[in-house]
Image (spheres, rainbow, N blue to C red):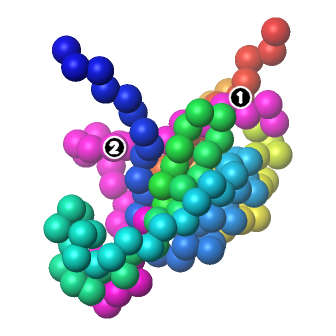
Amino acid sequence: MPPVTVTHVGLCVADLERSRRFYVDAFGFAEVRTLQPPDGVCSTLLQVPRPVGLTAVYLTRNEFVLELLHFERPGNPAARQRSMAEPGLTHLSFTTDDLPGTLAAVAALGGEVLTDTDVGVAVMVRDPDGQLLELLAARAG
């Protein structure tokens, strides 16, 4: 089998600054670079009709890289809630030493805490665009 390395996870966002602030301030990500590639390359690679208007912001947390994708163009589809049972990427998961503090930050930064999912050591939340995130309490010891 040829060697393969996972490089990042891409997340399309409606408001780039809002999402950047959410992931940096709620989860401690750091911005490492911003790219605005040409429309021609993006249209072909991503299968998005021109104009594409892509800005990609790369955030890192430890070894994990999250790419925020924002398309500044007319006609983008609206966000929709997806079922956990729907095929495709369902959620991102984060472990925190301060679950109550992280939940408060999520709410303060435009996310939604799904209180009915709270099982004590894990809670589901949504980012400002509705992306499902799982928050896990770090185990003591």
Provide the secondary structure element on which disc 2 rests: loop
Whether 132 is drawn above or below 42: the answer is: above
Q: Which residues are magenta?
A: 69-98
Which of the two discs, 1 and 2, labels the residue nearer the N terminus? 2
Provide the secondary structure element on which disc 1 rests: strand
Q: Mark 1 vs mark 2: give the one in front.
A: 2
How far apart are the two marked residues, 1 and 2, measured between alpha carbons?
Answer: 22 Å
Question: Which residue occupies the foreground of this view, 70 or 129?
Answer: 70
User: Label 2 is placed on what type of residue?
Assistant: Leu
Whether 52 is drawn above or below 99: the answer is: below
| Magenta run includes residue 58 | no
Question: As drawn, is 65 to the left or to the right of 25?
Answer: left
Question: Which residue occupies the foreground of this view, 19 or 125?
Answer: 19
Q: Which residue is mark 1?
A: 137
Label 2 crowd (10 A; few <14 / some 14-19 / many >=20): few
Question: Which residue occupies the foreground of this view, 118 or 139?
Answer: 139
Residue 47 is labelled as none
Task: Report the residue at 73% width, 24% height from top.
Answer: 138
Q: Which residue is mark 2?
A: 89
User: Label 1 is placed on what type of residue?
Assistant: Ala
Count of number-bearing discs: 2
Give the farthest residue toward the top. Answer: 141
Check the picture and name the quadrant holding the C terminus: top right
| Magenta run includes residue 81 | yes
Give the farthest residue toward the bottom. Answer: 74
Main SS of the magenta part reads: loop
Is residue 133 visible in the rendered image? The answer is yes
Task: Report the residue at 37% width, 60% height from top.
Answer: 81
* Residue 62 falls in image quadrant: top right
Task: Report the residue at 23% width, 63% height from top.
Answer: 46
